Image: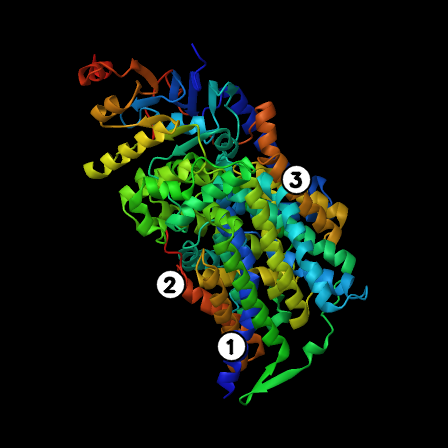
Amino acid sequence: MQLVETLINGCLLGGLYGLIGLGLSINFGTMRVVHLAHGDLIVLAAYFLVVVLVPAGIPPLAAAAIVVPVMFGVGFALQHLIVQHSLGRQLDRALGRGVLPPLIVTFGVSIVLQNVLLHYATADARTLQSSLASSGVTLGGVAIPTVRLVDFAVGLGSLGLLLLGLGRTALGRALRATSDDLDTARLVGIDPRRMYGVAAGISAATGGVAGVLLAATSTFYPSTGSEVLLVAFEVVVVGGLGSLVGTFLGGLLLASAQLLGAHFLGPSYGQLTAHAVVLAILVFRPQGLLPRTAP
Amino acid sequence: MTEPLLRVAGLVASYGQLQAVRGVSFEVGAGEALAVIGENGAGKTTLFHSLCGLHDAATGEVVFGGEPLLGAPAHRIVRRGIALVPEGRRIFPSLTVDENLRVAEDQHRRARGGAAPRWTRDRVYQLFPDLGPASRRGGHQISGGQQQMLAIGRALLSGPRLLLLDEVSLGLSPAVVKILYQALARIRADGVTLVFVEQDVHRALAFSDHLVCLHKGTVRLSGASRGRSLDDVRRAYFG
Amino acid sequence: MTARAAAAPGRLRAAIAAALVILLVACPAWGSDGTRATLIVFAYHAGLAQMWNLLAGYAGLVTFGQQLFIGLGGYTLAVGAERLGLGVWPSFALAAVVAGGLAVPVGALTFRLKGGYFAVGSWLVSEVFRLAVGNSAYLGHASGMFIRPARSVEPWTVYYLAVGLLVAMVALVVVTLRSRAGLALMAIRDAEDAAAGLGVHVWRLKLLVFVVSAAGTGLVAALITVQTPFIQPNAAFSIQWSAAASFMAVVGGLGTVEGPLIGAAVYVVLQDQLGATGEVHLIVLGAISVIVMLVAPRGIAGLVRDRLGWTLFPVARRPPQAAAGSTTGPRAA
């Protein structure tokens, strides 16, 4: 029973983990950039909610609705003003064939973000105070904290929205085309800079939702961004590069591994177990759970 | 003499130190069909990429519809009326056949505002009936011939005045090639100017008004196609 | 074609290098304890940056997991000296062996990831070790270990070790890059697929560089640990090491031999001025990284090279000038 309960809780928490990874996946899919500040953007959203919006008296739900478009703007601006300039078309030899500049730039942004948060919001632990945190339900003998249900529902809902948007809208088609083949996308009239800006904005917006959930689910510090980035990375690698559904499933797997490890091996072994699962997947199935079938 | 639709003068395109196109000049009049003939490595693809804005390091003079072209970004060049059917077709693998068409259609709609398009998806499916039954299949799941049809259809949906085709018949069966050239004839009748690469010299001579023979980045022979023979072309390379 | 340096500048460079070495060796004569401390800090930072640069600037491997080898090297020294009674100097050598040895499976695993995923994957592996070490009673849990035998090490011994290590590393890098292996390395960096097509054993060479870099980092870590002389998992396996290394290599100049030295100097000066801990220091470092990468991606050494044509350690090769109009080369259709 304990196993079942832990597993279910893991899957539910996985909704948040999957959501965390979605943004990284979108960024990478479109721009081939591993955005090292992605975790910090999520934490930024959490701080914005808890330190700015909620104390201003805005009810949490309305505050969440504000966070998302604001984060879209942050992601878009960051892309246009900073990251875009590191995506040169010239392959500069000493710069690791184009891989290095965006990595260094996004890493630098990450460091700046973390320390700016540290400076203005201090190192105190933060969380979203709400009735959600303490309530729970019991379904079929299994105890489930309400917030975990919300994590899953929102995570799954976000995935659904993204898939719908990508599959049914003109923008979605253009994004998918850009991810497939940038040069040919340009040949059908797509403006790459605009695409990158929008992709970065969408990625940051999903990060905004993830940030709200993060605030509701656990405590966080300015340094939490690094942990979140690692979660996003693991989730994407486990799920398979290029697949949003895979990323989400990766989230479920990872969170379950973490909770199972903590439950059976001890509280300090949760993360280790999750990491071990990721490394095992790298060894035995490096392409991930649901790799993209297209070349 | 009316102004040609496309005028290229002294085009040079390099990859670092290596010049792939070394001073190419030619003209294409509106409504004409120009065949580009040349072996692998002659500079044909680089030439096309330079015209479409995909090649950064191109210099020289290129005038399209009276306006200079070099230096404009690729997506703007598409809006000005040049579309490329790339070598290898480059179908978007994550998109279905229909979505491949829609992507171009969406962008063209954004560009032209409210004006009616010359080419619609329906017209493309009429032009290539083989595409209809496959419309929901993944872009990479159709045959080479269907991919070429799709690539042409996709380019048409950008509403071009000038259509560039890099390797029309390469790797395709004669039956498919026949269908393609019938379609190209209809496209031409619609008023679209064509510049196409064709390895089959007979075909190239039969379908085009003028021809340009490229060899190692320079023009070896150019002029009217009528009255031209295989021997003339051969002599341009070895004579 | 080997590196071409006209005779006169070559002799000037050798003279400068010799003068610097003499100055460093004679430090007890002219330097204070403070100078010594600063030079030690500079030396191990420069060593760290050289090793990061070896990976990123020459092998095209950007990593944010260099701290793995810092932790491994440091803990090997700690365990060797404190737990196993091996003595400080044997433990030093052991640190390089352990770090280099573990680099083989780690590299084999992480090389399955490309680009940015390799960078974060390396970080992940480091995290695994951090957590595992933190869970170990033998290694002192999160509070770490104190290395008693290291207390008896003379400060000037540490100094000479640091300087010697740095000089050896620079020499190793220069010699390697001028060798055939170095040529192959730069071929990989510039055009991996083409290099593979020419018969270069890309994977093997990358792994070799990875191992060398790890061993070097392990030695640097042992040095740092000897000086401290205690070690804690969260500090030893901290991402800050990779952050510092990447900053130094990028600001100094990637893909050059003098770049990491310049970068380390900048880093140490900044640390001094802004306070080693504290968020303002890190904000400035982060901002400078971003600005340099966008505005002067070749770093200070690159700027000096481009504007003034100076190179302290020339390792670049110039291909014979292509005959005008020649068209031999890759896909040119």
Determine if marks 2 and 3 fall on one subunit.
no
User: Residue B73 appears at what percent x and percent y?
Assistant: 52, 31
Which residue extends farthest top? B1
| Quadrant, the N terminus of chain B | top left
- The residue where tag 3 is placed is C291
* Circle 3 residues within 10 Å: few <14, some 14–19, many ≥20: some
- The residue where tag 1 is placed is A261
Residue A18 can be seen in this image: yes
User: Disc 1: which chain?
Assistant: A
> For this rendering, which residue is in front, B134 or C202?
B134
Task: Please indicate whether residue B197 sits to the left or right of residue A115 in the image.
Answer: left
Which label number is shown at residue B226?
A: none
> For this rendering, which residue is in front, C178 or C110?
C110
Q: Residue flagged by tag 2: what amino acid is it? A: Arg
- For image coordinates 51% across by 87% down, the residue present is A2
User: Disc 3: which chain?
Assistant: C
